[in-house]
Image: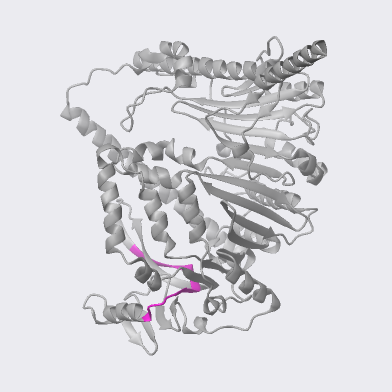
């Protein structure tokens, strides 16, 4: 019995040991990754129509008149019905994007890589994989059934004015390779000031500016000539074969390739030194990114080829979505340029704490719509708790009555205004740095004493709605500038048509008297009374010059609602259809919701599209765009926002809808490029 127990223990120990070994062989997601994406190939591949997609890829990837180097993008050797993994990260000197693929035909994949990489580049063979650089900053590695693509950008690390931190660890690892290029950064001694040189620089600038004016005037004259011809003939003129017009002859329009030594002509000794230094920089940068790529490939292909992702990243992933994306928004902002800039301020950590959040996205390409579900979560539990409380506001029926299906769209908000203070306090808490921590705490306590949260919340509890009824066309006058033969500037009065929004913005209040006193004050104040007057039941604001995007703005306080609108008719509730009644229920149910009819929005903006290609593209898009709808609510420890875009075409599904849309726009633009020019 004792022997059996000993053997059992030995077996258990061995199994446990093997489990540890295999666990250690997993390839972990890099710690500096701020972006992660999974593409559900099993679902997505079924929705792609390769008979349409393949010819389009050939068209957009071909170079001038050359035949496409690859003819079938549906057979690249990549297993499209398998899951793909993508992630990206950055630090002070290195930015990396990585994609993992599963192969179903290695030979076909090698054919595809050979057609993509530059001619003459040799494949590097390692112990258990091979790799090649298809560009200076793009590397691909593979074995029999896996492939990895890496795009790496490297810039020389340095200490900036925002931080005293040392250069990052990754840069240190490759510093020996970068040491050669340090000489290129050596500063030249500053030359003494020479006023004669300065005078010559200014004269050269004046000469350049005058030539620029001539070129612009010539281009304007050509366009005006085109406009007159189009207005009369509704097409561009066909160019004659024996045309002698120097400006438009085929010979003059031909773009000749540069000579091999064109850039070398007239090269000074100083230019030659600079060029060699730049070439040296480029070579050494390539050595660095190649070393980084090779180290990463070694790590992956020496593992069990399984990518280990933390539960925090996958927490809101839906296995049924077509695409899942995770972003560490806090690190993207705070570790980037903006975050470094904020560290230059004493209370910059407040902003760091505000941005310290994660967002996950699940994307679905359904038959009749595209659905995107965003899950937002702050990393600080207390801040997230206050955000969730903020999203649980009271409902207001008087606001939702403004929703109607004849409008272009609306945005409705129901939040608890009193919770803004709790959120602000949680952001301020523990945000002080060093000697300022006590000052921050004292300021928080003072705010709590001075501010009457309930009274302020009654002014604007947090219920509001914006309704865009339509876009009207308005002719406005503006000032442009022209130049005479001597290049003297003169003002020219012109007119143009702009889209003028007809809208209503309304929000609830429990203190009508406060807003009434504000509007009355504006009508009596010496500076504002000229523009702000009492007009019946409304207060009216009107600019002296009628050159803005609004003729007037009307203000009114009624039944606990403050209205700001462009027309008095807008605040009268309209009859609601069954569809708009559903929107009204959603506006009362969710913390935020809204919808926009993209087609009607484009119709209202059509005056903004001038050129023939823009008009043709607009006409096509108007026939095919759909409606957008969204809603936000608190679910557990996250704020979830769902955005639905309903399609209105005969495409197989919503994925191919976007392809069909882009394909037709591409064809329109290409046809315009081939059109003869006057």
Q: Position of residue 258 (x, y in %)?
A: 54, 25
- Quadrant of the image occupied by residue 651: bottom right
Identify the residue at horizontal 42%, vertical 73% (top origin): 550
- The extreme bottom residue here reads 536
- The residue shown at (29%, 18%) is 187
Q: Nearer the viewer, residue 159 or 619?
A: 159
Q: Is residue 98 visible?
A: yes
Which residues make up the magenta segment? Answer: 492-512
Observer-nearest residue: 221 or 521? Answer: 521
What secondary structure predominates along the stretch shown in magenta?
strand
Q: Is residue 287 above or below residue 47?
A: above
**Residue 560 position in % (x across, y down):** 44, 80
From what the image shows, is residue 44 above or below residue 6? Answer: below
Residue 50 x, y percent position in the rendering: 80, 41
Residue 62 makes an appearance in the image: no
- Per the image, is 509 magenta? yes
| Quarter of the figure with the N terminus | top right
Q: Position of residue 665 (x, y in %)?
A: 67, 51
């Amino acid at each position: 019995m004792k022997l059996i127990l000993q053997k059992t223990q030995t077996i258990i120990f061995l199994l446990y040991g093997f489990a540890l070994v295999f666990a250690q062989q997993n390839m972990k997601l890099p710690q500096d990754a701020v972006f992660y994406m999974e593409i559900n190939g099993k679902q997505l591949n079924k929705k792609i129509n390769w008979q349409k997609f393949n010819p389009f890829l050939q068209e957009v990837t071909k170079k001038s008149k050359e035949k496409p180097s690859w003819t079938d993008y549906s057979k690249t050797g990549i297993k499209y019905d398998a899951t793909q993994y993508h992630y990206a990260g950055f630090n002070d000197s290195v930015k990396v994007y990585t994609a993992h693929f599963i192969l179903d035909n290695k030979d076909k994949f090698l054919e595809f890589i050979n057609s993509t990489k530059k001619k003459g580049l040799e494949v590097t063979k390692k112990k258990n994989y091979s790799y090649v650089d298809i560009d200076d900053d793009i590397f691909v590695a593979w074995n029999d059934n896996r492939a990895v693509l890496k795009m790496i950008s490297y810039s020389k690390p340095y200490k900036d004015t925002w931080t005293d931190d040392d250069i990052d660890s990754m840069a240190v690892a490759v510093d020996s390779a970068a040491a050669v290029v340090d000489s290129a950064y050596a500063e030249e001694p500053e030359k003494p000031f020479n006023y004669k040189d300065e005078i010559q620089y200014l004269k050269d600038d004046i000469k350049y500016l005058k030539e620029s004016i001539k070129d612009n005037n010539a281009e304007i004259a050509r366009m005006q000539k085109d406009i007159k011809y189009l207005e009369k003939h509704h097409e561009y003129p066909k160019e004659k074969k024996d045309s002698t017009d120097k400006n438009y002859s085929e010979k003059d329009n031909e773009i000749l390739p540069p000579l091999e030594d064109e850039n070398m002509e007239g090269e000074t000794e100083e230019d030659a030194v600079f060029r060699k230094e730049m070439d040296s920089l480029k070579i050494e940068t390539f050595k660095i990114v190649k070393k980084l790529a090779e180290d990463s490939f070694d790590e992956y292909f020496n593992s069990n080829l399984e990518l280990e992702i933390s539960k925090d990243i996958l927490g809101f992933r839906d296995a049924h979505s077509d695409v899942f994306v995770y972003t560490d928004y806090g690190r993207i902002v705070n570790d980037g340029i903006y975050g470094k800039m904020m560290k230059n301020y004493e209370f910059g950590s407040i902003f760091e704490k505000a941005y310290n959040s994660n967002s996950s996205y699940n994307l679905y390409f359904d038959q009749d719509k595209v659905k995107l579900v965003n899950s937002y979560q702050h990393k600080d539990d207390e801040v997230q708790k206050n955000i969730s409380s903020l999203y649980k506001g009271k409902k207001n029926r008087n606001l939702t009555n403004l929703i109607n299906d004849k409008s272009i769209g609306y945005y409705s908000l129901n939040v608890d205004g009193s919770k803004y203070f709790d959120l602000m306090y949680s952001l301020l808490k523990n945000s002080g740095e060093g000697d300022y921590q006590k000052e921050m705490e004292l300021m928080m306590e003072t705010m709590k004493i001075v501010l009457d949260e309930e009274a302020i919340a009654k002014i604007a509890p947090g219920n509001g709605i914006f309704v865009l009824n339509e876009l009207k066309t308005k002719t406005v006058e503006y000032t442009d500038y022209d130049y005479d033969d001597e290049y003297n500037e003169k003002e020219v009065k012109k007119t143009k048509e702009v889209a003028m929004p007809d809208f209503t913005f309304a929000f609830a209040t429990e203190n009508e008297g406060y807003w009434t006193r504000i509007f009355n004050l504006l009508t009596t104040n010496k500076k504002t009374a000229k523009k702000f007057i009492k007009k019946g039941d409304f207060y009216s604001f009107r600019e002296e010059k009628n050159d803005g995007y609004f003729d007037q703005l009307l203000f009114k306080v009624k039944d606990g609602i403050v209205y700001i609108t462009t027309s008095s008719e807008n605040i009268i509730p309209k009859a609601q259809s069954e569809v708009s009644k559903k929107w009204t229920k959603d506006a009362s149910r969710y913390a935020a919701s809204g919808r926009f009819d993209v087609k009607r929005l484009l119709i209202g903006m059509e005056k903004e599209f001038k050129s023939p290609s823009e008009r043709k593209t607009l006409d096509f898009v108007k026939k095919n765009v759909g409606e957008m709808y969204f809603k936000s609510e608190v679910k557990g420890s996250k704020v979830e926002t769902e955005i639905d875009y309903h399609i209105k075409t005969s495409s197989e599904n919503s994925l191919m809808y976007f392809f069909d849309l882009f394909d037709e726009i591409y064809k329109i633009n290409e046809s315009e490029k081939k059109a003869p020019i006057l």
